[in-house]
Amino acid sequence: MNTKQLELRVANLDCEHDAAAIERGLQGFPGIAELKIYPKSAKVAITYDPASTKPEAVKEKLESLGFPPQKGMEMAEQPKPWRNPKVLTSVASGVFLLIGWLLGLAGVPAIFSTVVYIAAILIGGYYFGREAIEELIFEREIGIELLMSTAAVVATIMGLAGEGAMLVFLYSISEAAEGYTEEKTRAAIKALMDLAPKVALVRRGGVEREIPVQELEVGDVFIVKPGEAMATDGEILVGASSVNQAPVTGESVPVEKQPGDPVFAGSINGEGALEVRATKTFADNTISRIIHMVEEAQEKKGKSQRFIERFGARYSPAVLAIGILIAIVPPLFFSADWVTWITRATVFIVAAAPCALVISIPITLVASLGTGARQGVLIKGGVYVEELAKVKVVAMDKTGTLTRGEPEVTDVLLLRQDPDRLAASQQQLLALAAGIERRSGHPLAQAYRPACGGAGYSAV
């Protein structure tokens, strides 16, 4: 079967539950041979048969599922809080909770405050309650959401609607904040995506015009002006310049490039205009491969995380089962008070819910990967973050790893040295050099001004 690849950035993909919803929605969709979802990168990778389906049909299906694809490969941003349904329902739940509490203080009949509390529970618990039901029905799993929903419902039935509303409100806040927290972990990928320009100046048929970088084809000739980044990997046809490859390779000193030399996507052109023939498409260039590696790394789970997930899958049902036993065994077999023991069972379920345990390791690993990438260190996955804890010695083999990676003047040697005026002569020479190079954009020229304290001759 002749298949093609389709990669889409989608909105509203924030967690494993969203990924499961996409999998269920696309299950059985005609023409899809393979589906891979990257929740931490908000990306859906699809292998499809072009004879059976079209990309437009897949995009329409994703939009109908509530995960609209973005234009190009731009990463979706979270909506403003006042436009986010989860935030709005959480705020509404908190408002109703406050109203119910004030009604109680005012001495209004309890039925009114109870109704308000129930409204707070229904509104605030809509999203995570729906997740709990879907997880139970479709995935046959008992998660944290089900524990919280059960505790809120039981508290309300027992006449503690205020406590149930408070629980729902607090948990809905965490659900509402999840997307914004996830967005911060994607900063590393966004930073990599920003290395390459969004458009390229291409010469086709003797006419120069700007096109999106995604439309670049192998063999296209594109022009790179001084100070611009390379749109994709290529080979220089015309021109000579120094190229700063630090964003891609980490090399601290710009590399002089001549016709016939290769250039990498995301590297920055220096002082001369270049004409470059594309040797890779945007989807297959150096930056795209690095982005894909980072995405794969963020999805990789360390040993600790896999253990916690296996433990959590058994722990949550166990907590619910123990809570049920606490509620029914003492009243049935020891004639204890039903209300007392159901209350204790509810408190146990809330206290024993493995929220902090389940999210602790994933959040730590994602934060480590994201922070490392923002600092220019690409770690291949959570497994390797854990292995770093065992490192005793680190050996550096590249200039720029421990330094700033910027050229600077370290010594000034004069052919004719007057011992009495050595310092003044050195400063004068630096000022002359800075004046000569003041309009140059070459990295070596830029090193003179800091060396002479920012002073320089306005004309030489």
Image (spheres, rainbow, N blue to C red):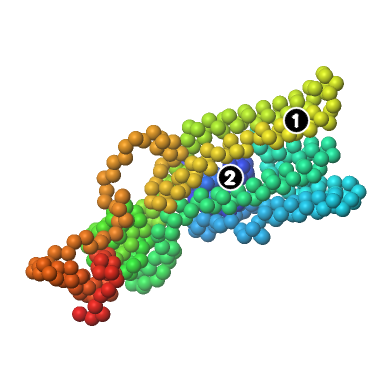
Residue 231 screen position, x and y as percent? 37, 61
Instruction: Give the total of numbered labels.
Output: 2
Q: Nearer the viewer, residue 407 or 227?
A: 407
For badge 1, the amino acid type reads Ala
Label 1 sits on residue: 345
* Residue 2 seen: no
Residue 182 screen position, x and y as percent? 55, 49
Residue 100 screen position, x and y as percent? 82, 51
Residue 424, placed above or below residue 134 = below
Sequence-wise, the earlier of marks 2 and 1 is 2
Is 335 left or right of 430, judged from the image as shown? right
Label 2 sits on residue: 15
Secondary structure beneath dot 2 equals loop
Secondary structure beneath dot 1 equals helix
Q: At x 73% / y 34%, what residue is drawn?
A: 347
Quadrant in the picture for residue 282: bottom left
Q: Residue furthest top?
A: 333
The quadrant of the image that shows the C terminus is bottom left
For badge 2, the amino acid type reads Cys
Is 375 left or right of 260, judged from the image as shown? right
Q: At x 52% / y 56%, what residue is drawn?
A: 75
* Residue 353 seen: yes
Foreground mark, 2 or 1, reads 1
Q: Residue furthest left?
A: 416
Q: At x 29% / y 71%, what residue is drawn?
A: 454
